[in-house]
Image: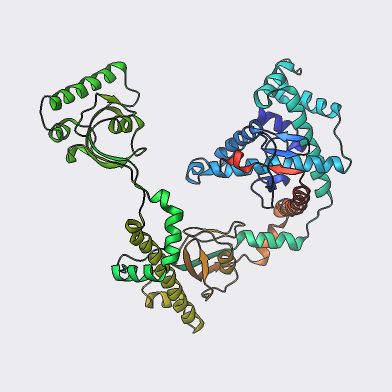
Amino acid sequence: MLESFRKGQRWLTLIFVASIGGVFIFFFGSGGSGIGPTTPTGNAIVQLDDVQLMMRDFQRVSSQREQMLREQLGDAYAQLNADQIVASQSLQQLVNGVVLAAAAEEMGLHVTTDEVRRVVQSSPAFINEEGKFSPQAFNAYAQSLFGTQRNFIQAFTRDLLGQKLLELLTAQTTVSDAEIDLATRYALEEARIAYAAIDAESLPEDEPLSDEAVEAWAEENEDALRETFNARAESLATPEQVRARHILIQVPSGGSDEEVADARSRAEAARSRVEAGEDFATVAGEVSDDVGTKSLGGDLGRFARGSNDPALDAAAFGLEVGALSEVVRSDVGWHVVRVDEKVEAAPATWQDSRLELAREGALADRAAARAEELAEVLAQAIEGGRSLEDAARDAGLTLERPPALTRRPDGFIPGLGAAEDLMTAAFTLQEGESSSEIFDLAGLKVLVQVIEQTTPDADDIAARRDENREAALVQKQNGVVEAWLADYRRQLEEAGRLKVNAALALGS
């Protein structure tokens, strides 16, 4: 229904979901402050003056955006952990929507009841088989997604107001041939790079820290070490733990009642053998379906609460040492559990934690110093006229060679993640040139060399000018709207009118 509704009114792109490649792509994760420093009253997610958007509004937008992204990304949706992207973009969309509507009203724009009625009643989404508007279809849609018709009309009116303002903001935007050609060049350029990435957070296995080095670091950093201990004492405490064994009789996924009953009967039989005096480990080795523990006599090792299936945890922590549980059902099957040891919870002590914390600190400092030293060696070699490839080989480092890069606004480079400055260098350096600049990226010191560049010729760029004109215009319009919207949001935030509860929406 929603899809046909969007198709029915091209100029209503903004209403529900920003279309990729349209003027409103800036909703799709654009920058800008967006999230105000103050929090709305009550349970509102977004509040601007008297307008309040609730969790229902956030969930509606999130659901629509998730569907759109899943259609675009397919299997890559899960690989990219796109749920987080959907959540942040949905919040941004809600904020931008109320900001645009408020700005439109203050500029004297308005939407009449007749406009809303005309658009709704002409939407294919609400036309029945007889070709007439269906109040029942409209009411079902409004109630399903907005709770009431009134909520729908209010949201719909705000979206129409925002759409009118967007049309004003972009109406006078033009794009020159030079701008089109530059955008085309950027889209077609490719660079193949090699980079050296030196870990600044951990040491290689063949460079361990001695106990003497750790003790020396602890003595030099005693005060800071005590501060760290005090801050982390709770997490360093030893939780209550048990050491237990189990016998698992697995139930097939979606198993029938007969299969469940048969598995339970086998588990009861195994329990009876142990209860009669047979060795638990021997029985587990013969009948348990847990391939990871049966060769160990069912030994689960020592574990804290939350480490296993809740039913297994409940059984283990509810038993005395040496006691045998009744047959217990978990998500995977039936268990018989025996507890071999119990360890009481204990607070962390300075004496027990001192060297452990000191080793963490010493390793971090040594790894950072090692990375800095190696990076400087490479940088100096490059400044002396050597290539990164040769310098890295002499230093015993291996260069990484990602697939060919294209210019991306987020600066994403395979193996490194977002690296905008490095991406810029990749398209600034000449073919074969190495950079002595050291890039700090997520715990790495990185240097880069351009191996190969592909640059489109002027004739190819000119031949694509007409087909790329609309895309270049859209990109420029996006820039105009983004800049204007970011500035207006900032004004609303500073005036205390715009408030956003990001923690409630994003669960942070």
Residue 323 vertical position relative to residue 211 in the rendered view, above or below: above
Would residue 16 be found to the left or right of residue 344 on screen? right
Please determine whether, in this image, residue 110 is positioned above or below residue 20: above
**Residue 411 shown left or right of residue 177 in the figure:** left
Where is residue 270? Give x, y as percent: 17, 25
In this rendered view, identify the residue nearer to me: 460 or 96.
96
Give me the residue at 38% from left, 75% from top: 393
Q: Residue at the location (72% across, 54% down)?
A: 472
The residue nearer to you, when weighing 470 against 19, is 19
At 47% from the left and 61% from the top, the residue drawn is 402
Quadrant the C terminus occupies: top right
Q: Where is residue 171 in the image (x, y as percent from the top left)?
A: 83, 48
Where's the N terminus, which quadrant? top right
Instruction: Determine the residue positioned at 64% across, 48% down.
Output: 29
The answer to whether residue 163 is visible is no
Residue, far bottom: 384
